[in-house]
Image: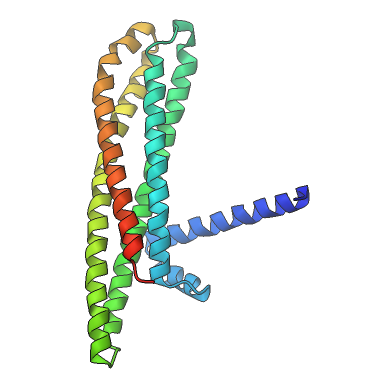
């Protein structure tokens, strides 16, 4: 691939990512009519959008898990460094914490989008059942709606647990970063070592919730009607 082609492809990927982010912002902000109209003009129905967003939730959750583990490791690293290197390691820990906040916020936005698109899909599906004149086909579609909605409810429950599990480790990361901001010395760092176990427990609980909701997302996608 030539350098020119590479740059063109890179610009196109950046543009596509921007379009997706704008579309996600529209649905989260409540501009669903515009959001769905744009995608429908491109041949993508609510079912397709829901599948895509659930797949993205899986990826976001994996990235959140990795980021929180990185932040925990960076905080752990502070406890064993020499006094003259504390500031450098503190800056890295602060940066990892900020990345954790950003990842968590992005995941929450994606979960909100999944909820909104899911409910809009089911509302549309329910309304369109009445337009099916064949009683047998209507019953089959109604049963498919019931099963899909139940699986979606299971996914929502798992995602809600994940959202709740984000806050405890984030708060403890924040506490340590803010404390160290004003007390960056070996004695202060050493006094925080005892908090590591509590943070590790919170991160482990979050990772368990992430794994469970990722599995729930996989099941939902596998069973979602084409």
Residue 195 left/right relative to 177: left
Q: Residue at x 25, y 85 (%)?
A: 138
Residue 93 pos. (x, y %) = 43, 24
| 186 relative to 125, above or below | above
Q: Quadrant of the C terminus?
A: bottom left
Residue 124 left/right relative to 60: left
Q: Residue at x 75, y 50 (%)?
A: 1
Residue 207 left/right relative to 78: left
Q: Residue at x 44, y 30 (%)?
A: 96
Q: Residue 197 or 187: which is nearer the viewer? A: 197
Q: Residue 62 or 84: which is nearer the viewer? A: 62
Residue 44 left/right relative to 69: right
Q: Residue at x 22, y 76 (%)?
A: 143
| 159 relative to 51, above or below | above
Q: Is residue 204 visible?
A: yes
Residue 74 pos. (x, y %) = 41, 23
Q: Quadrant of residue 223?
A: bottom left
Residue 58 pos. (x, y %) = 38, 50
Q: Residue 226 or 94: which is nearer the viewer? A: 226
Q: Quadrant of residue 68?
A: top left
Residue 103 pos. (x, y %) = 41, 41
Q: How is the image coloured?
A: rainbow
Q: Is residue 181 visible?
A: no
Q: Residue farthest to the bottom?
A: 133
| 60 relative to 171, above or below | below
């Amino acid at each position: 691939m030539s350098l020119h082609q590479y740059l063109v492809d890179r610009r196109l990927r950046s543009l596509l990512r921007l379009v997706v982010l704008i579309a996600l912002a529209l649905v989260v902000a409540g501009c669903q009519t515009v959001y769905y109209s744009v995608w429908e003009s491109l041949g993508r129905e609510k079912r397709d959008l829901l599948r895509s967003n659930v797949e993205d939730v899986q990826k976001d959750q994996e990235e959140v898990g990795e980021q929180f583990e990185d932040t925990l490791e960076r905080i752990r690293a502070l406890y064993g460094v020499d006094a003259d290197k504390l500031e450098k390691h503190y800056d890295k820990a602060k940066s990892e914490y900020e990345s954790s906040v950003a990842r968590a916020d992005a995941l929450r936005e994606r979960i909100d989008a999944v909820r909104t698109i899911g409910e809009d899909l089911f509302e549309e599906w329910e309304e369109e059942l009445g337009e099916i004149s064949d009683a047998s086909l209507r019953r089959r579609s109604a049963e498919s709606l019931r099963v899909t909605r139940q699986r979606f409810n299971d996914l929502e429950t798992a995602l809600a647990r994940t959202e709740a599990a984000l806050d405890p480790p984030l708060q403890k990361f924040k506490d340590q970063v803010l404390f160290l901001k004003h007390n960056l010395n070996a004695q202060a760092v050493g006094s925080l070592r005892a908090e590591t176990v509590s943070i590790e427990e919170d991160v482990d609980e979050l990772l368990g919730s992430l794994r469970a909701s990722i599995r729930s997302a996989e099941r939902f996608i596998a069973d979602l009607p084409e």
